[in-house]
Amino acid sequence: MSATISPPVISASVQTPAAAPMVQDVGLGSRLSWRFFGLAAFLVSIPVFIQAPLVRQWPWVSLVLTLGWIAFGYTLCRKSSNPLYGDLVLGFTWSWFAGSIYWGWFRWEPFIHLPIESVGVPFALWALMQQRYRVGAFFYLGSLWGTAITDGYFYLLGLIPFWRQVMQVEVRDSLPILQTALLQIQTVSGALWAGALILVLCVSGLLPLVSRRVWRGQHEALHWWAFMGAVLSTLVVDGLFWFAVRFA
């Protein structure tokens, strides 16, 4: 009578090398998740102060630098320990490219601002359908959403004429125009609309936190952290602009 050989029992806690995660998981408050949040916020806010004067003087330089951002993003995707950093840079590239075109040559016409800024939407939709470059796609869409909310505020308060005037004069001559526009903002309707749009940005920026994937630390949630950083940093940029004009 032959002995029955039982198959070896493998502990569920042991992972085979093939099943090991490619990158570390993220969770609410983890270093990686907040790092992507901070990088997204940085890419929305800080480059504005670099690109804004650049496109006024040398728009072609700003446009050509797009190629540098693309090369940098792809290099990070291929050689970085975490290719999602390159993914984020590639999403930022679309914002830089659109900003170079609009602020370099069309800045005096506010009604085509959002259409030009939306030039990267087909790429973002393709990325989402292909399940690729999701961090960059969500960053770009978050940045575009913040831009749309800010533009909507200008439309609602009738600030378009001030926009055109500012874009047709030198920077040193724009302060009186901006201060006149500020008087129109500092009204009851201006405050109410500002509060409503700030609420929209806060809700849309923080809504991903209700997702279980964000709380449970799934790697797929990183694109939401990039989205949140892009949306919420819009408030910082708008606030800095208001503060600069208010106390100039």
Image: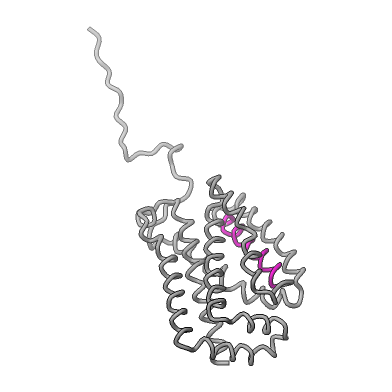
| Residue 141 coordinates in the image, percent (x, y) | 54, 60
In the rendered image of this protein, does residue 207 appear above or below residue 213?
below
Foreground pick, 84 / 239: 239
Residue situated furthest top in the rendering: 1
Q: Is residue 234 magenta?
A: no
> Which residue occupies 70% across, 77% down?
108
On the image, the x and y values in percent for residue 52 come to 67, 76
Horizontal placement of 192 versus 103: left or right? left
Q: Quadrant of residue 247?
A: bottom right
Above-or-below relation of 155 to 63: below
Is 94 magenta? The answer is yes
Residue 74: horizontal and vertical position, in percent?
64, 53
The magenta segment is 86-103
Q: Quadrant of residue 148?
A: bottom right
In the picture, the quarter occupied by the N terminus is: top left
Q: Residue at x 56, y 58 (%)?
A: 88
